[in-house]
Image: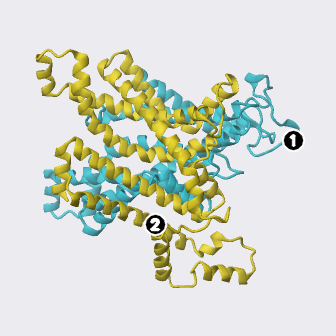
Chain colours: A cyan, B yellow
């Protein structure tokens, strides 16, 4: 039972990643090549043929090829977004914990501000004001969640700074950069990793949510949320167009969440959910 | 609850709304010439100049800011480029639909989440507990736009029981409210479970047990009272999730509320409407959090006095 808690989600996640990495071997079609003669083909499980195993959309584009590209883009963007947010939050959290008045004050004020408006609204307003572009979209995904890292790192760093060996290092004249890198960062690393497993599924959900609304990834590029949004328009005729990308999103977020829970219990028993 | 505490909280709400309005102003000016974003590119120069004077964009940045804030204070939120009507009217006529949806969703979240959490805590580490906690993880990982589409597939296209979209009667409310509400139900279940487990392990429960109070009464008389504080705290947090979720849910079900209006306005870059919705959601969140704080101080006097002495 305890092993299944790790192996089942791990197997699911490996399957999704393998699909994204080796997917192009499964199909000869390009993800954006439309074909007027091959529109609206059903997938194999609904009476289609093996030339388009998952069928085609209303422009005759191969759905398997589109799913592979969409999975790559969704997972890639969520990874980039998670890493940017992690670095941004960790650096600001460390700087704030040094107690350099202004930085600490500004960081705390930004954390408060971020909590004052739902991030979805901030993201949509940013797209409305600056217009949608891939660079802006990546920046939005990167900024998302930084405050949870900043808050965690600041709190852990503040308590790490009172540890006797950190005090000793400071007394010996070690500079603040070196103290942060050699002594503070290693003690907060577990907290950061656990937070990343929480942040990653939410970044996927933000990416696919915005793309679903038509305000994230723009055609001809595609992502799982955008495929789902397209599939929604032909739900009555071809349910699989929406259900397949939705299922990949769900399996990915679910498996990372479950792995994160298991990781948290192992790395940081103080965060375990049971009191 | 002293009058000064109340005033301080009111001031914080106003400061938050002011900060949100200022941020929108700064972002709009950072994006370059606001007119370039607001007007079609192929307009003749005279018309652009007329707009510049009419919108006050020929004045200094500081002058623009003051007149912008002055207009907001007087309730003038500008005009929608899409409909040519006041942005405020557009939002107000959709406020009702969004309030009905979010209130029903909150009802679903609490009515499903709290009993499920109680069930899990009472049967700790047994089948009901595992089932509830697994469903909570599923709910956390399930995108609400996908869940909504699965509901449409089942109840509209397969069973043909419920309408798929729009708002023409109570039947139309069922799927949107379930989609938005169940997304938060997991958080309520988890919190109820852990709060109740904590209470059940508290020393005073030992006394209650020793007095011979039956288990059901122990939970309802002492347990529920003690978990009110964490539940009200979660209520404050979940308002943000509810507002964000309403945007997607309203789009999935074509629900004629503010969320759908926001999506349309962002796609068309109808900035006056977007700006008003940003300010409105900041005001809603700030007011809710202030009310939650006041409620917490009333439920648990220790919290109120601690906050007052802290500032």
Task: Give the Cα distance between marks 2 and 1.
Answer: 49 Å
Q: Secondary structure at mark 1?
A: helix
The residue that appears at 71% across and 70% down in the rendered structure is B40
A34 to the left or right of A118: right
B137 to the left or right of A205: left
Question: Circle 2 sits on which residue?
Answer: B21
Q: Is residue A103 visible?
A: yes
- Name the disc covering residue B34, or none: none
Position in image of residue B119 (x %, y %): 35, 21
Position in image of residue B145 (x %, y %): 58, 39
The residue that appears at 46% across and 49% down in the rendered structure is A82
- Placement of A110 over or under B125, stated as above or below: below
Question: Circle 1 sits on which residue?
Answer: A36
Q: Nearer the viewer, residue B81 or B27?
A: B81
The residue that appears at 13% across and 27% down in the rendered structure is B204
- Placement of A249 over or under B256, stated as above or below: above
Q: Chain of mark 2?
A: B
Q: How many marks?
A: 2
B227 to the left or right of B152: left
- Placement of B288 over or under B149, stated as above or below: below
Mark 1 crowdedness (10 Å alpha carbons): few <14, some 14-19, many ≥20: few
């Amino acid at each position: 039972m305890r092993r299944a808690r790790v192996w089942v989600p791990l197997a699911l996640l490996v399957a999704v990643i393998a699909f994204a990495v080796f997917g192009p071997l499964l199909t000869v079609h390009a993800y954006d090549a439309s074909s007027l003669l091959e529109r609206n083909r059903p997938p194999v499980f609904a009476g289609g043929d093996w030339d388009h195993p998952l069928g085609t959309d209303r422009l005759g584009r191969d759905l398997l090829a589109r799913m592979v590209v969409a999975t790559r883009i969704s997972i890639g963007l969520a990874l980039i977004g998670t890493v940017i947010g992690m670095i941004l939050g960790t650096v600001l959290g460390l700087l704030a914990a040094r107690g350099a008045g202004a930085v600490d004050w500004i960081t705390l004020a930004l954390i408060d501000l971020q909590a004052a408006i739902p991030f979805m609204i901030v993201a949509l307003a940013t797209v409305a004001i600056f217009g949608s572009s891939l660079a802006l979209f990546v920046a939005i995904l990167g900024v998302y969640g930084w405050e949870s890292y900043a808050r965690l790192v600041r709190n852990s760093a503040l308590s790490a700074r009172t540890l006797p060996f950190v005090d000793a290092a400071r007394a010996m004249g070690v500079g603040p950069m070196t103290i942060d890198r050699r002594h503070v960062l290693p003690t907060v690393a577990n907290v950061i990793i656990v937070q990343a497993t929480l942040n990653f599924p939410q970044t996927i959900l933000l990416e696919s949510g915005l793309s679903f609304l038509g305000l994230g990834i723009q055609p001809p590029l595609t992502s799982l949320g955008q495929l789902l949004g397209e599939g929604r328009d032909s739900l009555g005729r071809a349910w699989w167009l929406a259900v397949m990308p939705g299922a990949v999103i769900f399996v990915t977020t679910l498996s990372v969440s479950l792995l994160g829970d298991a990781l948290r219990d192992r790395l940081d028993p103080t965060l375990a959910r049971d009191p | 609850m002293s009058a000064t505490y109340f005033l301080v909280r009111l001031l914080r709400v106003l400061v938050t709304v002011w900060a949100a309005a200022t941020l929108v102003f700064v972002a709009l000016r950072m994006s370059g010439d606001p007119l370039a974003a607001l007007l079609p590119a192929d307009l003749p120069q005279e018309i652009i100049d007329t707009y510049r004077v009419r919108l006050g964009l020929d004045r200094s940045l500081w002058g623009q800011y003051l007149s912008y804030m002055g207009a907001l204070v007087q309730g003038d939120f500008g005009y929608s480029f899409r409909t040519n009507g006041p942005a405020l009217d557009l939002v107000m006529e959709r406020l009702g639909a969004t309030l009905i949806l979010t209130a029903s969703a909150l009802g679903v979240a609490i009515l499903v989440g709290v009993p499920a959490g109680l069930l899990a805590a009472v049967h700790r580490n047994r089948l009901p507990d595992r089932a509830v906690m697994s469903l909570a993880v599923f709910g956390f990982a399930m995108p609400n736009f996908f869940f909504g589409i699965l509901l449409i597939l089942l109840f509209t296209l397969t069973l043909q029981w419920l309408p798929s979209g729009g708002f023409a009667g109570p039947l139309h409310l069922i799927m949107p409210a379930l989609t938005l509400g169940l997304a938060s139900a997991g958080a309520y279940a988890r919190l109820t479970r852990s709060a109740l487990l904590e209470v059940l392990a508290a020393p005073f429960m030992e006394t209650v047990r020793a007095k011979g109070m039956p288990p059901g009464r122990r939970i309802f008389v002492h347990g529920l009272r003690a978990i009110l504080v964490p539940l009200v705290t979660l209520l404050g947090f979940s308002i943000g999730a509810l507002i964000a979720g309403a945007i997607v849910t309203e789009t999935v079900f074509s629900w004629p509320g503010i969320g759908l209006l926001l999506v349309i306005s962002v796609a068309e870059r109808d900035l006056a409407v977007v700006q008003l919705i940003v300010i409105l959601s900041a005001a809603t969140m700030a007011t809710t959090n202030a009310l939650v704080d006041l409620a917490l101080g009333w439920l648990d006097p220790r919290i109120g006095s601690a906050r007052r002495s802290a500032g």
